[in-house]
Amino acid sequence: MAESDSVLITKDDGTVQDVVPAAVAGEDVVYMTGLLCPGFVNSHCHLELSHMRGVIPEGTGLVDFLGAVIRRRGMGADGPEGGIASAIAAAEQEMLDGGIVAVGDICNTADTLGQKGLGRLHYHNFIETIGFVEQGAAARFEQSKAIYDRFGGGRSLVPHAPYSVSAALFSLIADLAGNRLLTMHNQESEEENAFFLSGKGDFLRLYAMLGVDVSFFHGTGKRSLGSCLPYFHEGQSMILVHNVATEAGDLEIEEGGPELYFCLCPNANLYIGGQLPDVELLDRRGCRIVVGTDSLASNHRLSVLEELKTLQRAFPRLDAARLLGWATLNGARALQMEELLGSFSTGKKPGVVLLTGLEDQRLASGTTARRII
């Protein structure tokens, strides 16, 4: 954080010119009560699920949550205000109002394409691929590639999760030319690790719900992250999302693989399963940490600030400066937008957010965020 007597100088379009001491800033200075912060980066969202707000009850656990998303994905799609399109527009406005300037957005459809075309936020679109049965890998890849081709720049084709992507499909994704920025849901529950270790456990219920025969899978003898990370290459970057069941041993990663970021979505974790990742472990081990909101199917709000408040309540030693760094510069780096966003460096256009209601430089329940540029 800059000193309290610093002045941020920007052009009319929000481009940062300098940060200088107040004594040399001149007379045309606007003083505000609170803390000025670069715009937030929401490193993980599912904007296309915004019509599912309130559809799935809290506390179901991951397997039943996933089953409910698949079964009830159409609920709310024909709402009185235009269904999916209006929900997407309202959710984007909510993010704008809360100080978010950029989003890493998961896409299984092209439903968000029209709204994104308005250019109100910066997006990197992660086109998600799913298919655990080897024989269907090529067809699943081509289905997702067709959606990928409809999006312009700022796009990647990515795996959904270790338990939903086959070895053949992982290879197709990893080897796609230019596919350097990736993301994946990772270790959302210990049952995910159990499934990879032995081929057994509660995840078998999920496949039964979906009518997918996984009798061919007997486990890898490794936990889920160690089972799938070797498919990816040096020079790629991977945002691992959720990490609720990530342990110290999972972080013993061999060199030569992708650069990793660990995305925290604490309010979604509490909504689905009532558990949080071991954030202090990730921080202590020097992991690159970023912050996301997940979707309105698993969260009450798309607010990065509310995610930070939850993290600080659960891990009080995390101060505001560290948390805000995760939600700004780290997020910009993870989405490869750091040349434009994430800090008040000269020449950047990161957005400016005013935080008010802090208590002793800590986020309080009454802290609010408002984008002013």
Image: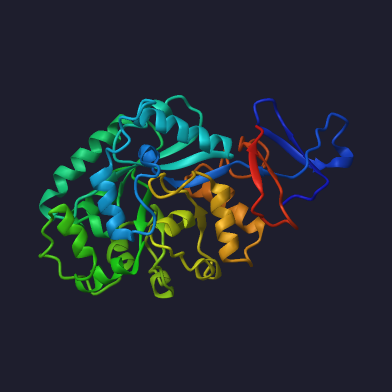
The answer to whether residue 121 of the structure is visible from this angle is yes
Which residue shows up at 58% across the image and 66% down it? 315
Residue toward you, 111 or 119: 111
Q: Is residue 294 left or right of residue 177?
A: right
**Residue 10 against residue 276 in the figure, above or below:** above
Q: Is residue 121 left or right of residue 316?
A: left
Q: Position of residue 16 (x, y in %)?
A: 68, 35
Residue toward you, 256 or 123: 123
Indicate the quadrant containing the C terminus: top left, top right, bottom left or bottom right.
top right
The answer to whether residue 155 of the structure is visible from this angle is no
Q: Quadrant of residue 62?
A: bottom left
Q: Position of residue 260 (x, y in %)?
A: 43, 58
Q: Position of residue 92 (x, y in %)?
A: 48, 34
**Residue 94 against residue 286 in the figure, above or below:** above
Which residue shows up at 67% across the image and 42% down it? 345
Q: Is residue 159 left or right of residue 28?
A: left
Which residue shows up at 61% across the image and 38% down it? 350
Q: Position of residue 118 (x, y in %)?
A: 46, 24
Residue toward you, 200 or 43: 200
**Residue 284 against residue 342 in the figure, above or below:** below
Q: Quadrant of residue 31?
A: top right
Which residue shows up at 54% across the image and 66% down it? 283
